[in-house]
Image (cartoon, rainbow, N blue to C red):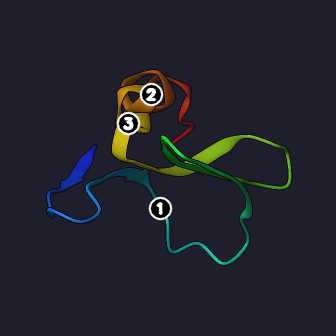
Amino acid sequence: MLVKVKTPDLPLHLAGDTRREDLTWHIVAAKDGLVAKGVDAENQLRAFVVSEDRMKDAFALLKQLVS
């Protein structure tokens, strides 16, 4: 399920189990926003967070999530 956090200063979209301690996070921060991908030991996408103009990537990432 995609969770949308709507705040004026930093809107976010997130999905997956972002609280898992076993995930390795790959984070790219740029002028247009943040993309953080949490992958497991098998390099499977288990969670993600996107912000600002990168929120447009949320639905593509949602399709890649392994439950």
The quarter of the picture where residue 42 lies is top right
Amino acid type for the residue under numbered disc 2 = Asp
Instruction: Of the two numbered discs 3 and 1 on the same chain, state the one appearing first in sequence.
Output: 1
- Assess disc 2: are there few (<14), some (14-19) or many (≥20) residues with their C-alpha within 10 Å of its C-alpha: some
Q: Which one is in front in this view, the residue at disc 1 or the one at disc 2?
A: 2
Secondary structure type for disc 2: helix
Where residue 8 appears, as percent x and y from the top left, is: 14, 62
The CA distance from mark 1 to mark 2 is 18 Å
Task: Determine which of the numbered discs, if any, sits on residue 57 in the image.
Answer: 2
**61 left or right, relative to 5:** right
Q: Are marks 2 and 3 in contact (CB under 8 Å)?
A: no
Secondary structure type for disc 3: helix
At 49% from the left and 65% from the top, the residue drawn is 18
Where residue 49 appears, as percent x and y from the top left, is: 47, 53
Instruction: Of the two numbered discs 1 and 2 on the same chain, state the one appearing first in sequence.
Output: 1
The CA distance from mark 2 to mark 3 is 9 Å
Amino acid type for the residue under numbered disc 1 = Asp
Task: Determine which of the numbered discs, if any, sits on residue 17 in the image.
Answer: 1
The residue beneath circle 3 is 53
At 71% from the left and 65% from the top, the residue drawn is 23
